[in-house]
Image: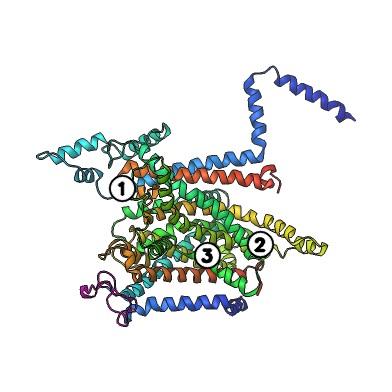
Amino acid sequence: MIEMWELLLRSRKVMSSLVVLTVLILLGTVGPLLTGDPYFMNLSIMGQPPSLAHFLGTTSFGEDVFAQLCNAIGNSLVVGLIAGGLGTLIAILVGAVGPYRGGLADKIANLVTNLALVLPLIPLFIIIASVVRGLNLVLIGVILAATSWPWAARSIRSQVLTLKEREFVNLARMSGQGSIQIVVTEVLPNMLAYIMMVFVILTGTSILAESALSMIGVSTTRTITLGYMLYWAQHETTVPFWWNIWWWFIPPGVVLTALLTAIFVIHAGMDEVFNPRLREI
Amino acid sequence: MKRVTESPVNGSNSQSRTEPKHLLSYFLSKSKNFLANSYVRFLVNKIGFYVVVVFFSLALVFIVIESMPGDPVAVMIASGNPPPGADIEVLKAAMRQYFGLDKPILDRFVMYLGNFLTGNMGQSYHFYPVPVSTIILYYLPYTLSLAIPVLLVSFFVGNWVGARAAYMKGRLNEAIYFGLVFCNQLPPFWLGLVLIFLYVLVFHGIPPIGAATQGTIPSLSISYFFDLLAHWVLPFLTLLVVYVGAWATGMRSMVTHEKDSGYVRYGEQLGFKKSKLMAYTQRNAILPQFTGLNMVFNGIVGQTLIIEIVFGWPGLGLLLYNAVFNYDYPLIFGCFLVIIVIIVVGNFLIDVLYGFLDPRMRTGHG
């Protein structure tokens, strides 16, 4: 197991994405401490292009774009981690316990998973997000988790089904362990890498989904996230035509793309290392 | 020996038994044979499942809409123009009764479902006398004209690019892989903004936002068609870039995996032409891509809805978005019904297609 992690770190692609990810996390955590209040509107410097005083210029309300960006990265990551963590938990619960209880429980879990896979999430989310008042980051994360788990549950389920037939699991069953105990002590540890992969990719998709929703203005209206910056840059500009202030809407998207690409490459690297069929290192 | 003599007797026996009987039993046995075909049974199961999906999602949306804070009647009165001196409370009560909002939730849900079965979606609150179905029929072609071309074009182009990318060597391979992943991970809504920005930079004009240039009257003329096309290109390109990336990364890894397998090596030893081997490899590699078609289709429909809002393209996404903000319950419900029907029908067609492509599905072996 440990040498596999070493293999992972030796891959150049994974290392470079880890560097990108670390830089972004640092920007998101340390950045807000160093920059000023992201909501502070200095109306005497409205819509200024990038300069030494303001790295990425100012918005059309005189806010510092760089300060906003740092806060947005942090908040988007928080949403992603909450949604990714919770979503992974739900996926494990539905995907792993189902095959073990067997019978009706498995059938119901399978049906719910398939059902949730077909549900059109984005229209559903537009409706839900407009219903829930006082949305904050945690609530958004929970809603995203509640809607993003199905494919993860399905793939975890298929993994568990193959693991279930291994000798050590049969041995544990013969020695009289309960089914939940087997799942917790025998199956899940063997799936740790796989669960990590699910977590990584769920985090990425949740960040993207949250940005999409706040971009069209149905997510948080008070807390800065990457999509929220895009929403304000496009809709609430006081300068004629939002595309004139390109330094406002370009950075959030670049950061978002970098973040998602890094997450995807890390996921692909893990897939290569832990999935013996694809290993080529 | 005995068996041979017995079997024709049995056969004629059963025939004589079914022949004179009613037509009904004949059809029953026929349909039993029909259902015994595993492909048909698979499709029937799928239809049942999709009916459950439609019912369940409608119920879910109905509950969500009902728990919406805010009062549609109040919004209607605020956006309308009540006559001066009218008693607002009486007006509200009358409107509530008129739209059936005073009935219990379950009654209204049953009423909606019953209406849907007869093809009646009620009247919109916001555009009051106009039936919901009329509004949706106006907006629906716009959504389909984005989603379907994106699905088809990105599938063919993406798989073609991905298959070629797998045969690249060295640095070029890495660069192309990175490019494809990058395209796939671009957030479409932001890519849309960037494309508009680039358009402004290059053409120095008003970017094509909305369905047509403001002020033009919709007509069946060529010039209007080209106007529509000009407005359609940017959202289409936005979605296309992202989904070509998605298909190509998947296809590339499948072909990379497949081109090392035994039969390709064997074919190489036998001296097959490279193009022939590539064709075989791609045939085998594309089947898992069809498995992913369902999920990508759902994704494309969802992303189309968001892109419509970004570009002001008057499709179902924009309609739903506006309906949510207007508390237009029948319109929200109707929009969602149409979206879920699009998704369910699309998924079902993909299931049928999958059965045609994979012979194991049809025969039930394997």
The answer to whether dots 2 and 3 both sit on one chain is no
Residue B1 picture quarter: top right
Q: CA distance from mark 2 to mark 1?
A: 50 Å
Q: Tell me the kind of residue under disc 2.
A: Val
B240 is within the stretch colored magenta: no
Residue A198 seen by the camera: yes
- At horizontal 42% and vertical 43% (from top left) the residue drawn is B140
Distance in Å between CA atoms under marks 1 and 3: 50 Å
Position of residue B259 measured from the top left corner of the image (x, y, whole percent): 70, 63
- Residue type highlighted by circle 3: Val
Is A51 left or right of B264, judged from the image as shown?
Answer: left
Q: What numbered label is drawn on residue A231?
A: none
| Percent x, y of residue A150 | 50, 56
Residue assigned mark 3: A198
Residue furthest to the top: B20
Stretch of the chain drawn in magenta: A35-62
In the image, B7: left or right of B166?
Answer: right
Residue bearing the label numbered 1: B215
Mark 3 packing: few (<14 Cα in 10 Å), some, or many (20+)? many
Mark on residue B255?
Answer: 2
